[in-house]
Amino acid sequence: MTHDSATSAVEGSKASAKAYLSISIVVALAGAAWWFDPDWLYGWIKVLHVVAVISWMVGLFYLPRLFVYHADAATGSEPAVTFEVMEQRLVKVIMTPAMMVSWVTGLWLAWSGFGFLGIWLWVKLAAVVGLTVFHVLLSRSARRFAKGENAWTARQWRMANEIPTVLMIVVVIMVIIKPFA
């Protein structure tokens, strides 16, 4: 292991630890707030949900773009190794924690704000399940890239990059327009 990769591993571990510590603090505070149920709680949970969704979506848009470039890099080359580090950090430090916070806060909002009622809400949840499945596909693909086992071309990754866009549009329509309300 070279000095640069050792430094990257240490920095990645520190960033990951900070992310999980932050999530733990947020979850503990959310639990305390839920227990005491103050009037301001719903609005702040909604803020946290929107921030988490934005962070998650950024990752869902950016990771396939990294895969486009990674697919064209020679396995084991310096660019490929750099992409592997970027991909792993994006998945572990940003995307997965943001997805988890999005789900927890989203389900809480759906339960407390709407009682899980409304066809629009169920369509939105179906689209979010689709985003989650895509997230899992991307996470597995990042691991395959790290092993030098990518099976998709850069063109296929460009096309896959449209999946979260379509699902996000469905979510936004359901939340704002509520066509089946």
Image: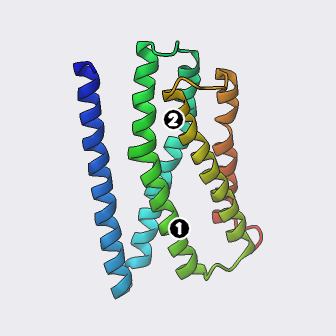
Q: Amino acid at mark 2?
A: Arg
In the shown orientation, is residue 51 left or right of residue 33? right
**Residue at (56% x, 27% y) in the render:** 67
Q: Residues within 10 Å of mark 1 (few under 14, many from 20)?
A: many
Quarter occupied by residue 86? top left
Residue topped by disc 1: 106
Work out whether 86 lies above or below 131: above
Quarter occupied by residue 69? top right
Direction right: furthest residue: 180
In the shown orientation, is residue 150 left or right of residue 5? right
Residue topped by disc 2: 143
Instruction: Give the tally of numbered discs.
Output: 2
Q: Which mark is residue 145?
A: none
Pick whichever, 166 or 92, lies toward us: 92
**x and y, in percent, of residue 71 in the image:** 58, 20
**x and y, in percent, of residue 177 in the image:** 69, 64
Q: In which quadrant of the rendered image does the C terminus lie? A: bottom right
Pick whichever, 157 or 110, lies toward us: 157
Q: Amino acid at mark 1?
A: Gly
Mark 1 and mark 2: Cα distance apart in space: 28 Å
- The answer to whether residue 38 shows anywhere in this view is no
Q: Residues within 10 Å of mark 2 (few under 14, many from 20)?
A: some
Pick whichever, 39 or 85, lies toward us: 85
